[in-house]
Image (cartoon, helix red, strand yellow):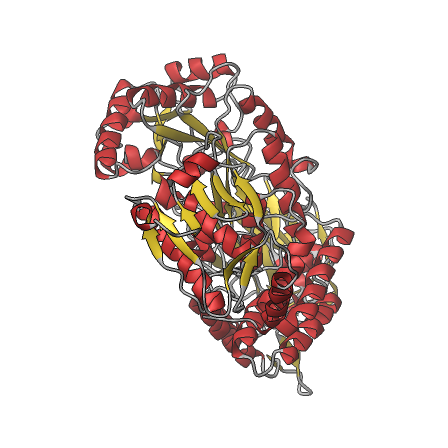
């Protein structure tokens, strides 16, 4: 069992309390002995028996004294008793009606009583007691911190009643897969509560099974059936869903919730019947709630959830969810630098929460607390956790799913999970104190430096007035809170933190994990800078480019540390997700080296503006010498719904042998290859003639990203100006259609030889 040296101080504090002569205190153990016994009901439940053993365990771990566990029948003659469970003492003492989610810890000057409303709440009460009165701590999925004290005393009068403000609480981080952590922190898991959860239409009526034979089961979109969603007015779909749920419920009778929710896609049904309901209710959620209510009515003893997400986020005008239906409302569109209550991009969510709240009191929130495109990226959102939870509580929300990085390690995963759990339990908790204590207890002597880094990063993010985007990229913060200069300051603090715990392998590993986001940022930005300062390559005296000294070794070590830290994925989706794929990408970059270009740092003018959401280096992106990779959010210049017409001025007449460029094909993000590409040359910038033209072949449905090179044949002409015109698709293909979206093209570099 891990015992932190700082807790030696607690021994003296506990002893001082015990020697104060306070007659009201209960002395549970003293110098290896105890007058107490732990008493359970005569026929304890498994949970009550477990709770008694758990309390016995903690007292023994702290004091070395094992207090016997007996049942009520055997307690005769025992004057000092710790009651655990729904004992006779509990029933007499706690006359108030116990709520199902409540637990109680009560001392009356003689006895100590633990009881709960139902289920695991009695276990939660034991962990609460261990943390508050025995000063034990569980900060992560590492072993708990257990102090030592031969004498354990507590106040003689204790009256603790705890009813969590939320009936469902999940912090989706790696620690959530540790059963002890879950119980200690009073957290739950979707997998434990839901028999079927999340986007479920395709699980209930699989398109791969039914679409070819029964296309009428699926959405009618712009006059054509497609398997994006279900036709919710189709009687056969209703019968299939009910039959499927009956089978699932028979196999999993203990599940509490069952999800009936749209797929993670658009393309809802526009048939006459579905559209009539949606028009009447002013939202596609109308046909959804009508369908879910009907299914819920077939299982009145079961609880159901459905998603208010994407096209179903807007509430119906008047159609109320059934009493056994919970609405899972998503806040996915909100930036995270400000609380939900004031962030401009959260306005639709706030309106949705109000509207749904007028229809039902059964609302869960699907919240997002990490950067899904870059799990390791610095994401300073801790200051918004408390105001967000308070806001949701004030609006009657019954449960919160805070989606972090899931199974994979991410930035401050231990701290964020811990803070969320504490705030679920008490939304008025002192977050600064909790954070400071966490750093002290978890990082030891490195804590002061990591706390400085944590505070400085938050300060610089706020000062930058940049938006924290859950689909952002640390590369795009190269001018804000992740500038090279600031990265150097942050790195110096980590150097000091590492030095402070040198020789302590446990603490050194924790500091190493905490440093990964900073290292990841440096490597990602190196791709962005490329041949510039802070980039990958340097030019030698002979004019040749080579990889910076030790960079390959640093990347290799970083990947090894990622694996050691439990990083299994670097992003939710997309290229180079795993550490091994990330290393392979870097090795490919090292191998390819630098491509020379006559257009390097030439003047570029654009006829149409590039997409402002992905600025890269502006016009310079096309001639900075740095190719793009599979991530469209940097090193690519994007054009949304308009052609790219780029003119490069070489400054003087130059002999040109060829022109080539890369375009990105990434339909998942609505980025497609150009329909046409035309390369023209000019001597005077007025009169142009074409030297190369390309047409993209039509491609069928796919979602993998790829870089496509377009290269002219040998030209052997002299010119000063090169003009490249790349035409966007006129419209999105049917298989990737989405309202409000237009096709985008992305070009990384125009190389001129």
Classify residue 220 by image quadrant.
top left
Could you say which is closer to the camera, residue 504 or residue 218?
504
Could you tell me which quadrant the N terminus lies in? bottom left
The image shows residue 204 at horizontal and vertical percentages of: 29, 33
Classify residue 718 by image quadrant.
bottom right
Q: Where 687 sits versus 392, above or below?
A: below
Classify residue 249 by image quadrant.
top left
Residue drawn at point x = 44 percent, y = 20 percent: 321
Q: Where 283 sits versus 572, above or below?
A: above
The image shows residue 257 at horizontal and vertical percentages of: 36, 34
Most extreme residue toward the front is: 77
Left or right of 374 in this view: 141: left
Most extreme residue toward the bottom is: 541
Could you tell me which quadrant the C terminus lies in? bottom right
Residue 676 visible in the displayed image: yes
Could you say which is closer to the camera, residue 349 or residue 63?
63
Residue 587 visible in the displayed image: no
| Numbered circles on residues, count | 0
The image shows residue 490 at horizontal and vertical percentages of: 70, 68
Residue drawn at point x = 56 percent, y = 71 percent: 4
Could you say which is closer to the camera, residue 39 or residue 604?
39
Could you say which is closer to the camera, residue 751 or residue 665?
665
Residue drawn at point x = 61 percent, y = 78 percent: 501
Residue drawn at point x = 40 percent, y = 60 percent: 67
Left or right of 173 in this view: 431: right
Q: Where 721 sits versus 226, above or below?
A: below
The image shows residue 385 at horizontal and vertical percentages of: 62, 46
């Amino acid at each position: 069992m891990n015992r932190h040296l700082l807790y030696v101080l607690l021994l003296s504090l506990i002893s001082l309390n015990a020697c104060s002569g306070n007659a009201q205190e209960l002395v549970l153990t003293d110098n290896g002995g105890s007058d107490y016994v732990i008493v359970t009901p005569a026929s304890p439940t498994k949970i009550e028996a477990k709770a008694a053993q758990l309390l016995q365990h903690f007292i023994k771990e702290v004091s070395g004294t094992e207090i016997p566990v007996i049942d009520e029948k055997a307690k005769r003659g025992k004057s000092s008793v710790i009651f655990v469970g729904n004992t006779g003492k509990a029933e007499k003492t706690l006359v108030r009606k116990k709520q199902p989610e409540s637990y109680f810890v009560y001392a009356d000057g003689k006895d100590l009583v633990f009881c709960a409303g139902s289920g695991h709440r009695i276990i939660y009460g034991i962990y609460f007691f261990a943390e508050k009165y025995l000063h034990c701590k569980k900060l992560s999925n590492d072993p708990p911190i257990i102090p030592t004290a031969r004498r354990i005393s507590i106040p003689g009068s204790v009256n603790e009643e705890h009813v969590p403000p939320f009936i469902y609480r999940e912090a989706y981080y790696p620690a959530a897969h540790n059963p002890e952590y879950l119980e200690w922190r009073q957290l739950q898991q979707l997998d434990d509560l839901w028999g079927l959860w999340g986007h479920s239409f395709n699980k209930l009526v699989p398109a791969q099974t039914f679409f070819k034979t029964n296309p009428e089961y699926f959405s009618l979109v712009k006059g054509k059936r497609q398997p994006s969603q279900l036709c919710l007015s189709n009687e056969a779909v209703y019968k299939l869903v009910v039959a499927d749920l009956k089978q699932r419920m028979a196999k999993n009778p203990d599940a509490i919730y069952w999800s009936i929710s749209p797929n993670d896609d658009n393309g809802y049904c526009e048939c006459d019947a579905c559209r009539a309901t949606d028009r009447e209710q002013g939202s596609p959620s109308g046909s959804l709630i009508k369908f879910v209510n009907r299914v819920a009515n077939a299982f009145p003893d079961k609880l159901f959830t459905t998603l208010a997400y994407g096209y179903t986020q807007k509430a119906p005008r008047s159609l109320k969810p059934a009493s056994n239906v919970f609405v899972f409302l998503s806040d996915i569109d909100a930036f995270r630098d400000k609380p939900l209550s004031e962030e401009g991009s959260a306005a639709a969510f706030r309106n949705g929460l109000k509207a749904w709240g007028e229809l039902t009191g059964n609302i869960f929130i699907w919240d997002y607390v990490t950067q899904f495109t870059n799990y390791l990226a610095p994401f300073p959102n801790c200051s918004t956790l408390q105001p967000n939870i308070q806001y949701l509580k004030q609006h009657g929300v019954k449960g919160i799913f805070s989606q972090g990085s899931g199974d994979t390690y991410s930035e401050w995963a231990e701290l964020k999970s811990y803070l969320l759990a504490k705030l679920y339990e008490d939304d008025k908790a002192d977050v600064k104190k909790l954070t400071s204590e966490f750093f002290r207890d978890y990082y030891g002597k490195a804590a002061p430096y990591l706390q400085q880094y944590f505070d400085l990063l938050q300060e610089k993010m706020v000062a930058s007035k940049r938006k924290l985007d859950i689909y952002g990229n640390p590369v795009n913060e190269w001018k804000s809170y992740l500038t090279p200069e600031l990265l150097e300051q942050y790195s110096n603090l980590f150097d000091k933190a590492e030095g402070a715990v040198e020789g302590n392998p446990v603490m050194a590993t924790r500091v190493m994990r905490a440093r990964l986001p900073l290292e990841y940022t440096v490597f990602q930005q190196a791709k962005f800078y490329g041949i510039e300062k802070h980039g990958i390559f340097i030019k030698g005296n002979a004019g040749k480019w080579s990889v910076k000294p030790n960079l390959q070794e640093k990347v290799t070590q970083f990947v090894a540390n990622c694996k050691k830290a439990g990083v299994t994925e670097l992003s939710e989706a997309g290229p180079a997700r795993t550490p091994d794929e990330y290393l392979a990408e870097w090795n490919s970059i090292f191998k390819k080296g630098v491509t020379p270009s006559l257009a390097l740092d030439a003047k570029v003018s654009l006829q149409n503006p590039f997409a402002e959401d992905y600025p890269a280096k502006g016009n310079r992106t096309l001639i900075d010498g740095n190719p793009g990779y599979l991530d469209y959010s940097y090193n690519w210049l994007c054009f949304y719904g308009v052609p790219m017409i780029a003119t490069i001025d070489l400054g003087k007449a130059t002999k040109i042998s060829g022109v080539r460029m890369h375009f990105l094909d990434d339909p998942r993000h609505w980025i497609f290859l150009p329909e046409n590409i035309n390369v023209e040359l000019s001597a005077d910038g007025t009169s142009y003639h074409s030297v190369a033209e390309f047409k993209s072949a039509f491609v069928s449905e796919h979602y993998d990203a790829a870089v496509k090179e377009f290269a002219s044949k040998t030209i052997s002409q002299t010119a000063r100006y090169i003009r490249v015109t790349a035409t966007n698709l006129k419209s999105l293909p049917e298989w990737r259609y989405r309202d409000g979206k237009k096709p985008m093209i992305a070009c990384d570099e125009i190389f001129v030889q």
